[in-house]
Amino acid sequence: FRTALPLVLCACTGENALKDRIKIGYIGPLTGPAASYGKDTLNAARMAVEEVNEQGGIQGRRVQLLVENGQCTGAAAATAAQKLVEIDGVVGIIGGNCSAETLAIAPITERSQIVSIAALSSSSDITDAGDFVFRVYPSGEKAGLAYARYFQEHSIASVAVIAATTDFCQSLISSIERALPEETQ
């Protein structure tokens, strides 16, 4: 978040830049199976905002973090992003954590030319999601390539996989399959 917050703050333009506070949105899974990730990243975002504000803010203006629950779903994240952008007037969004959240947020922030930075999203689709969409977590494609290389280097001919039906797990499995030669699949 030491990387994400300054990037989002660089987007401070327009009407919001003239007000007392710089509003930054946060979208992450605060309930459900991925809530532990959301709570951790939210705490990190809060700590970063607190640190910036303790140092005098940005050009004397305090940063305000507005929090929304993306529930690790595209629908909830899209609703949250629309509220943060259209009603709250944020200058940037930290989130989502899950790829479904990030991919749902992307068209909204892209259309509004508001930066969004994902902390944990790994879908390779995020790479091409827009000019205002960033992530600080590597693509799942890279992890898949690493696993495939390991299997090949150690002559592992078959692997059993037990995985959740989450975006992360399914994209990781797909990237491993794509990276392996067809005769090993």
Image (tube, grey):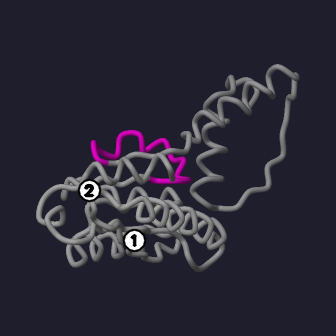
Residue 107 percent location from the top left of the image: 28, 57
Depth check: give the residue in front, 74 or 22. Answer: 22
- Between the C-alphas of marks 2 and 1, the distance is 17 Å
Looking at the image, residue 164 sits to the left or right of residue 71; the answer is: right
- On screen, residue 40 above or below 148: below
- On screen, residue 163 above or below 160: below
For marks 2 and 1, the one nearer the N-term is: 2
Instruction: Name the quarter where the C terminus is drawn.
Output: top right
Instruction: Specify the principal SS of the magenta part.
Output: loop
Depth check: give the residue in front, 123 or 15. Answer: 15
| Amino acid type at image mark 1 | Leu
In the image, the segment drawn in magenta is 118-132
Looking at the image, residue 135 sits to the left or right of residue 24; the answer is: right
- On screen, residue 163 above or below 128: below
Going 33% across and 68% down the picture, which residue do you hit? 62
Few, some or many C-alpha atoms within 10 Å of disc 2 (few <14, some 14-19, many ≥20)? few
Going 41% across and 70% down the picture, which residue do you hit? 77
Please identify the quarter of the rendering in which residue 141 is found.
top right
The residue mark sitting in front, 2 or 1, is 2
Q: Which residue is mark 1?
A: 65
- On screen, residue 118 above or below 138: below
Tag shown at residue 19: none
Going 41% across and 65% down the picture, which residue do you hit? 53
Q: Which residue is mark 2?
A: 59
| Amino acid type at image mark 2 | Gln
Few, some or many C-alpha atoms within 10 Å of disc 1 (few <14, some 14-19, many ≥20)? many
Secondary structure at numbered mark 1:
strand
